Amino acid sequence: MVHTMPISRTRDKLTTLPGTLKTSDTIAVTSRGKRVLAVMSWKKYDVIRETMSILGDPALMRSLKRSLREARTGSLVSLAKVAKDLG
């Protein structure tokens, strides 16, 4: 959920935000009515960074798309077969 907070109020509440901000929440900080900053938990930020890294890696995206296609068509290899093949 996105909450909106003026920059002056954000400044006053900054030290209490870590204890009140849920992992899924984001605060849109406004200045003169315009959104200028986003404040979120580090966990949420880290997830976004990791997602952007994956989306920005062409080889990884090809592999992911191939894996999803294989899962949809049932072209999967069982864990037992993999274990047997690896010895």
Image: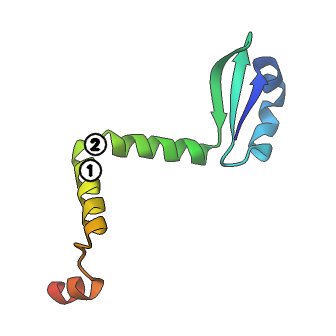
The foreground one among 71 and 4 is: 71
Q: Quadrant of residue 82?
A: bottom left
x, y percent for residue 12: 84, 25
x, y percent for residue 31: 72, 13
Q: CA distance from mark 1 to mark 2?
A: 5 Å
Q: Is residue 28 above or below residue 53?
A: above
Q: In the visual, does 51 lie left or right of 79?
A: right
Dot 1 falls on a residue whose secondary structure is helix
Dot 1: few (<14), some (14–19), or many (≥20) neighbours within 10 Å?
A: few
Inspect the image, locate mark 2, and give the three-letter code of the amino acid beneath it. Answer: Asp
Inspect the image, locate mark 1, and give the three-letter code of the amino acid beneath it. Answer: Leu
Q: Give the quadrant of the N terminus.
A: top right
Q: In the visual, does 9 lie left or right of 66?
A: right
Q: Residue at x 28, y 42 (%)?
A: 57
Q: Are marks 1 and 2 in contact (CB under 8 Å)?
A: yes
Q: Residue at x 30, y 60 (%)?
A: 68
- The coloring applied to the image is rainbow
x, y percent for residue 26: 67, 37
Q: Give the quadrant of the C terminus.
A: bottom left
Q: Quadrant of residue 73?
A: bottom left
Dot 2 falls on a residue whose secondary structure is loop
Per the rendering, the mark at residue 57 is: 2
Please give the residue where the numbered disc 1 appears in the rendered image: 60
Per the rendering, the mark at residue 41 is: none
Q: Quadrant of residue 65?
A: bottom left
